[in-house]
Image (tube, rainbow, N blue to C red):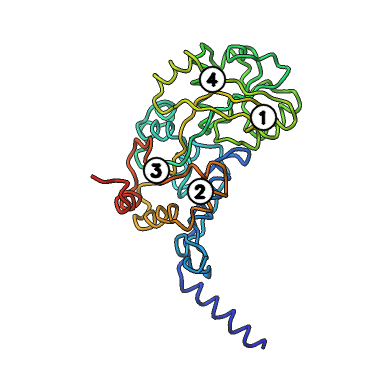
Amino acid sequence: MIFSLLGLVILMLGSANAQSITFLRIGTGSTAGTYYPIGTLIASVISNPPGSRPCEAGGSCGVPGLIATAQTTHGSVENIYGVASGSFDTALAQSDMVAAAYNGKGIFRKKKNEPVTSLRVIANLYPEDIHLVVRRGAEIKSVGDLKGKRVSIDVPGSGTRENAKQILKVYGLSTKDIDAVTADPDKAVTMILQDSLDAFFFVAGYPVSAVSELADAGKIDLLPIEGKVAEKFLTEHSYYSVSEIPADTYRELKTVLTLAVSTQWIVNADMPDELVYEMTRALWHPENRHLLDRGHVKGKLILPETALKGVSIPLHPGAERYYREIGVITD
């Protein structure tokens, strides 16, 4: 009996070793946001470790031999540079930040002498909503009331930080007009609970655990970004769209009109075409649909028919090949 089990283990190890293993790092964001759970979900969808049951037998329908893991980061800007430098194999990033990096505009024009032209897109995923979270009792009823208040605009390396500056600017404010605090979402939650912060910006697909925690404690409200100022903002920033956070997404908070940008799954141009093709196919494999639908509220919005929506930089050739095969690209 013991020898039989030992032989089975050796056989299994030999089979696993015979199949090449590829490890993949996905840059995401804070655990308090949406990038990390979505990145973890994508990792589970595309992974197929050696020894997994076959897809047709109810097992993994990911890329054979691939083991993907999600890594926490500061967000879009860090993820973009991480993919470009090889720190991450792939990552999630805001569509506006991806376009700015590829074209060398905005913050990327200031930080580097050349555009980040090695970026490629695998898929557009889901919309991210601008959460402008304000502490109850801080006497903030409008964006203009942020003047002189303690406001976190997130940390360097996050897309939220750049979005916050853009929002403040359209309302006639700058970081000099507020008591600007550099805090990631986790720290911002703690500071709100301690009454040492008045407001913070957070760009993420609802529901966001950080906001849920504060709403459950009855500590916050969400400020709308709407009206003529929002309309002006949309004319100046084409990557944004009108959105709303529905009532009761967060406990006892009413519907809030706001703006949104899209999340894109990015990769470096030098990643092998065949690997990206297999990753793209795994993402949209029919047998993986239930994982996306049940894994996160935003997972339901990750759909092949919107995979190219808002994509303004080149697709990776491996992803493009798959989209041509399924008819999403028809030229």
Check disc 1 and report the residue beneath it: 188
Task: Point out which mark residue 26 bears.
Answer: 2
Q: Residue at x 68, y 20 (%)?
A: 198
Check disc 3 and report the residue beneath it: 307
**Which sits earlier in the primary sequence, circle 1 or circle 2?**
2
Where does residue 159 sit, x and y in percent of width and height? Answer: 50, 31
Q: Given this view, does label 1 or label 3 mark the residue nearer the observer?
A: 3
Where does residue 323 sit, x and y in percent of width and height? Answer: 33, 49
Label 2's element?
strand
Where does residue 148 sit, x and y in percent of width and height? Answer: 64, 12
Check disc 4 and report the residue beneath it: 225
The amino acid type of the residue labelled 2 equals Ile
As measured in the structure, the alpha-carbon distance from the residue carrying label 1 to the one carrying label 4 is: 20 Å
Dot 2 alpha-carbon crowd within 10 angstroms: few under 14, some 14 to 19, many 20 or more: many
The amino acid type of the residue labelled 1 equals Ala
Asked if the residue under mark 4 is in contact with the one under mark 2, i.e. CB atoms within 8 Å, the reply is no
The amino acid type of the residue labelled 4 equals Ile
Label 3's element?
loop
Q: Residue at x 51, y 21 (%)?
A: 165
